[in-house]
Image (cartoon, rainbow, N blue to C red):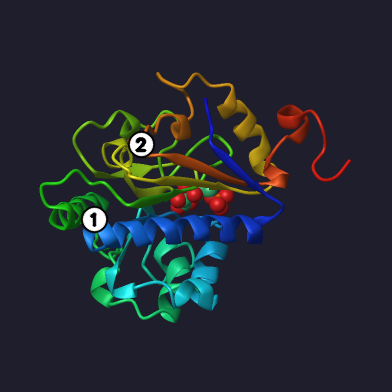
């Protein structure tokens, strides 16, 4: 699998590198379409990027927040104030600290008693937002699980075969097990996609992904997403097997 990678010494540098790219895409999107629609990822890795976006004046003041629309590529089926909620993580790291209009924060209605209803409701919100256009986010942030999952698309999930629906409710082998996730129907429309992967625990899966054929039915969901637009992999030294990549250890001789 061909990977356009950007490798950084650590998570802080990786997050700044991704934010610099995000700001470029944001500027172009607002200039061309009057808005910047971003699908956020959950888990631990993006939290640093979110807090830098909120705390560093270089990014915060240059962001036209009333043109920014936040969505989530996946969410855990827990209340929005639950510690496992991707929305809560983003609220605490970013949303609470920036002047973004509440109507531009499109979180999943996980308070609904039926997860299928949450998926349908969020899909309608996406269809309202994108109108008749394909659901092409200006930027999609995606993470990577040790077994190759991304968003909440896990190996063997029927959601990977979805051809109609934009959002589905899934049961996954992780905590919490009930999740909502965008499907490849949406993710394959992305104008720009960033995979963020940091830490030694991502080294094995990244090496496995590299040896995967580009097209076709990989067992790894992250290799099953084929966005229309460019895909960039933001990695840190710990996640990269230097010996395998460069035949030498990182840093000066
Ligand atoms: C989630 C995510 C998931 C995440 C990966 C990587 O809701 O958990 O969206 O896809 O990106 O599990 O998680 P880490 O960044 O914590 O390693």
Residue 212 position in % (x across, y down): 53, 21
Q: Is residue 249 left or right of residue 21?
A: right
- Compared to 232, does 25 lie above or below? below
Residue 6, quarter of the rendered image: top right
The residue wearing badge 1 is 118
Residue 253, quarter of the rendered image: top right
Q: Crowding at label 1, few (<14), some or many (≥20) Cα neighbours within 10 Å?
A: many
Q: Crowding at label 2, few (<14), some or many (≥20) Cα neighbours within 10 Å?
A: some
Circles 2 and 1, Cβ within 8 Å, touching? The answer is no
Name the element at disc 2: loop
Q: Is residue 95 left or right of residue 167?
A: right
Residue 208 position in % (x across, y down): 60, 27
Point out the residue furthest to the right here: 253
Q: Which badge, 2 or 1, comes first in the chain's sequence?
A: 1
Instruction: Measure how far apart labels 2 and 1 are at the Cα level.
Output: 25 Å
Residue sitting at x 28%, y 61%: 31
The residue wearing badge 2 is 227
Residue sitting at x 52%, y 74%: 58
Q: Is residue 34 left or right of residue 243?
A: left
Q: Along the line of sight, which residue is nearer the eye, 163 or 6?
A: 6
């Amino acid at each position: 699998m061909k990977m356009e990678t950007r490798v950084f010494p650590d998570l802080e540098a990786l997050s700044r590198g991704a934010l610099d790219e995000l700001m470029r895409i944001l500027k172009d999107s607002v200039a061309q379409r009057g808005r910047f629609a971003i699908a956020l990822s959950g888990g631990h890795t993006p939290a640093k990027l979110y807090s830098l976006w909120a705390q560093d004046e270089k990014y915060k003041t240059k962001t036209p927040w009333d043109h920014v629309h936040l969505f989530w590529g996946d969410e855990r089926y827990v209340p929005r104030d639950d510690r496992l909620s991707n929305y809560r993580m983003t609220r605490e790291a970013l949303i609470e600290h920036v002047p973004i209009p509440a109507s531009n924060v499109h979180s999943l209605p996980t308070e609904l008693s039926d997860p299928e209803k949450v998926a349908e409701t969020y899909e309608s919100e996406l269809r309202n937002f994108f109108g008749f256009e394909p659901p092409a986010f200006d930027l999609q942030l995606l993470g990577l699980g040790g077994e190759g999952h991304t968003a909440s698309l896990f190996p063997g999930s029927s959601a990977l075969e979805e051809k109609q629906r934009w959002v589905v409710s899934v049961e996954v082998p992780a905590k919490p097990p009930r999740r909502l996730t965008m499907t490849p129907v949406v993710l394959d429309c992305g104008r720009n996609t960033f995979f963020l992967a940091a830490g030694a625990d991502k080294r094995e899966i990244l090496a496995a992904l590299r040896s995967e054929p580009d097209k076709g039915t990989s067992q790894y969901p992250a290799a099953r997403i084929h966005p229309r637009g460019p895909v960039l992999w933001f990695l840190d030294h710990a996640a990269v097997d230097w010996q395998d990549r460069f035949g030498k250890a990182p840093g000066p001789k």
